Image (cartoon, grey):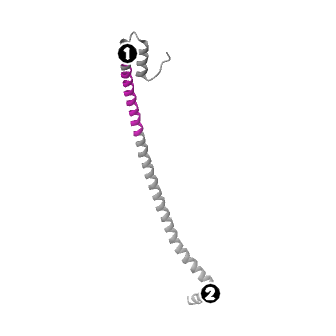
Amino acid sequence: MMLALKTFWLTLKKNWKVALLTAWSIAIWLISRKNAQGAIDTMKANKESYEAQIAALKEQHKIEKQRLEELNLKYQETIATIEQKYNVKEKELSKEKKKRVKEIVEKAKDNPNEINEKIENLFGFVSDS
């Protein structure tokens, strides 16, 4: 055993640079392995964070899309209600105008110029006659 130890010591003294380089390489490998694990952990944390952000954005998009659909439905209902009210009012107005024209014609049976003038004033247009 002693002979092996002496031989090792002589070889180490003669090739100290190789031994130091080997020890240095092992130390760097151990240190970098710890840093590599830290980098891997950091990348995993970033990936989880990005996935959480993507999930949140998808949920927000889903909510916004649903809200947009609700607003579109409300818009369509409002337009339908307005059109319905418009049609009712238009019929009422048409009836009123017809009634007013009858009154004008009955009041001025003998005077066509007066009829034309009152109808022009009522409807806001000018006749050619």
Residue drawn at 42 percent across, 45 percent down: 64
Q: Residues within 10 Å of mark 2 (few under 14, many from 20)?
A: few
The location of residue 82, given as percent across then percent down, is 38, 30
Q: Name the side, left or right, on which 36 lies relative to 12.
A: left
Q: Residues within 10 Å of mark 1 (few under 14, many from 20)?
A: some
Tell which circle, 1 or 2, labels the residue nearer the N-terminal end.
2
Residue type marked 1:
Ile
Task: Say which mark, if any, is on residue 104.
Answer: 1
In the picture shown, does residue 73 fall above or below 20?
above
Specify the segment rendered in magenta: 70-95
Q: Which residue is under mark 2?
A: 11
Q: Name the side, left or right, on which 106 lies relative to 28.
A: left
Task: Say which mark, if any, is on residue 14.
Answer: none
Residue drawn at 44 percent across, 24 percent down: 124
Residue type marked 2:
Thr
- Give the structural element (helix, strand or loop) at label 1: helix
